[in-house]
Image (cartoon, grey):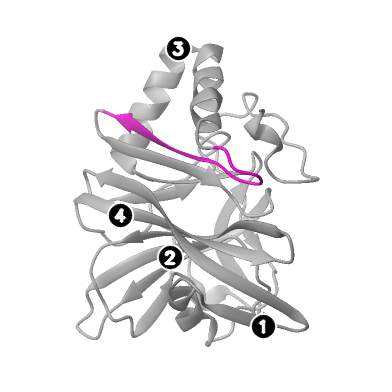
Amino acid sequence: MNWRALAAGVALAGLAACSPRAAPEAKVEPPPVVPRAGPVFDEAFADGFEATVGDTRYRFRAQSAGDIVLTSGKLVACDVIVSCGGPFTGAVPVGTFPLRFAIAARDDDERIALARIDFAPGPIVRWELAVTEGQDVATLKKGEFFGYGVDSGTGAFMDAEALRAFEAERDRAGEAFDDRLFAEMDKTYRHTRSWLLHPTPKGTVALFSSGYGDGSYPTYKAYDQDGTLVAVITDFGIVPWE
């Protein structure tokens, strides 16, 4: 099955046409993420958690995707198939860490709603919007955020060094590289989603379906009471938190 049709109704075009070095503008005006959304992001990884937004009931379950290896502490989140910008400001721990998804079910449809790297056990008491160099949250208006653009229906986490290794491997292999990548993602395919942990000499490039597909998605850093980074979570906008 062609993983590029994972997001129903979303056409995945131009996968090889765009340079992975040219980052798109990712400042958009989505439905607002209000303060209560932070705790919900954490609770969504508890099996059996449910949330009602408007008239819609969402049921959540957690899914482990394996481990991601980070080598420099400079974390990148992007659509690595199409384009990537720079790493987030502030270092993350170096090492091997669990990658998990929160799967949200609505009626007979379910999607990857949240992607998460766990760094410490918590509990979480504070959330921050993750930003890259030059982004200032003070410039955002109500309902705005900084996030990364997706045009291939795929999000990703990786170390900045792993991104460079991934790009070098892709340049050497040419068009055959993307074909192999898509074939590997097909091995984990489930209706609406798939994922892949692609190893490089400098760490893991973790790719996964981005909710309903294309869009712009924010990433948050979660901290405990001592200021220790507990997790980094990307919200794919499945639930319109109000």
Mark 3 vs mark 1: in front: 1
Quarter of the image where one finds residue 151 = top right
Q: Which residue is mark 4?
A: 98
For badge 1, the amino acid type reads: Thr
* CB within 8 Å, label 1 to label 2: no
Residue 114 in the image: state x and y as whole percent: 51, 62
Q: Which residue is mark 3?
A: 173
Mark 2 vs mark 3: in front: 3
Residue at 46% across, 71% down: 47
The secondary structure type at the circle numbered 3 is helix
Residue at 34% across, 51% down: 75
The secondary structure type at the circle numbered 1 is strand
Crowd tier of the residue under label 1, counting other residues whose Cα lies within 10 Å: few below 14, some 14–19, many 20 or above: few
Instruction: Give, as a single range, the part of the protein colored magenta.
Output: 189-200
Q: Which residue is mark 2?
A: 130
Q: Earlier in the sequence, mark 3 or mark 4?
A: 4
For badge 2, the amino acid type reads: Ala
Instruction: Judge left or right: residue 168 versus residue 56.
Output: left
The secondary structure type at the circle numbered 2 is loop
**Does 222 sit above or below residue 69?**
below
Of the pair 132 and 158, the residue shown nearer to us: 158
Instruction: Judge left or right: residue 152 versus residue 233.
Output: right
